[in-house]
Amino acid sequence: RDILGANVLFSNANLNELESLLTDIGQKVSGSSDFIMKVDTDEFLTVHDGNGKSDATASRVIEYLSGFAQNETHPLRLLPGNARVGYVQGSIPSERVCKRDIHSTPDNFPLGKIQDIDWFKAVFDSRQRINLINLGGHNLGGPKQEKSEATTQFNIIHYHSRCIEIELENTRRVLERHD
């Protein structure tokens, strides 16, 4: 557990087995957690500021999460069961960055616009039984865009699009991990 109370789990499981493993973990920890989100190593949790910007500072994330346990009117407590990450901001491949170093760290890549994508990531309410956490932790069949009360202020910065050489290597690893 870190200072935000987040549990980070890593697994070498075959990707074909990961959905049942994630669901099992979600069901086992749900009684001792407030909510569960599945994120990848190229995804970073931030908070949308309500003005079209993302705030990735630890203090803003702490501010958004603080008071959840004691405050009955906290926005995350008022969600009607499972919810969704409200916003996503993807990286943009950059020829300039890739020519300099194909292994550049994510912070060197420009980011695209913040978008509201209703299927991107689910925020599972741990007060109810978790039925399924899919491979990507996506909000499939969950709260849709028109149900704004089921939307959190969470924003995921997704550094998925990088140099083509890295994309090819990552794709090869995924195929191998699916057997």
Image: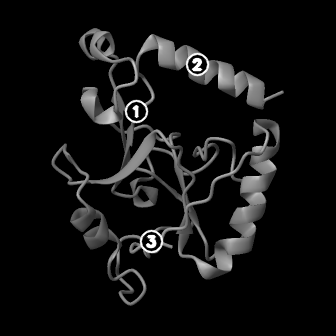
* First along the sequence among labels 2 and 1: 1
Furthest residue in direction left, as rendered: 51
Give the residue type at disc 3: Asp
Residue at horizontal 33 percent and vertical 57 percent from the top: 153
Label disc, if present, on residue 105 of the rendered structure: none
Give the residue type at disc 2: Glu
Please state if 38 lies on the left or on the right of 109 as rendered: right
Determine the CA span between mark 2 and mark 3. 31 Å
Please state if 149 lies on the left or on the right of 177 as rendered: left
Q: Closer to the observer: label 2 or label 1? A: 2
Q: Is residue 128 visible?
A: no
Q: Which residue is mark 1?
A: 159
* First along the sequence among labels 1 and 3: 3
Label disc, if present, on residue 2 of the rendered structure: 3
Badge 1: few (under 14), some or many (20 or more) residues near its Cα, within 10 Å? Answer: many
Asked if disc 1 and disc 3 are in contact, CB closer than 8 Å, the reply is: no
Asked if disc 2 and disc 3 are in contact, CB closer than 8 Å, the reply is: no
Determine the CA span between mark 2 and mark 1. 15 Å
Q: Which residue is mark 2?
A: 169
Residue at horizontal 52 percent and vertical 18 percent from the top: 167
- Which of the two residues, 106 or 18, is positioned nearer the viewer here? 106
Please state if 43 lies on the left or on the right of 176 as rendered: left
Callout 2 secondary element: helix
Residue 14 vertical placement versus 22 (above, below): above
Residue at horizontal 50 percent and vertical 43 percent from the top: 41
Furthest residue in direction bottom, as rendered: 70
Q: How far across and how far down the image is residue 75, in percent?
A: 35, 71
* First along the sequence among labels 2 and 3: 3
Residue 50 vertical placement versus 42 (above, below): below
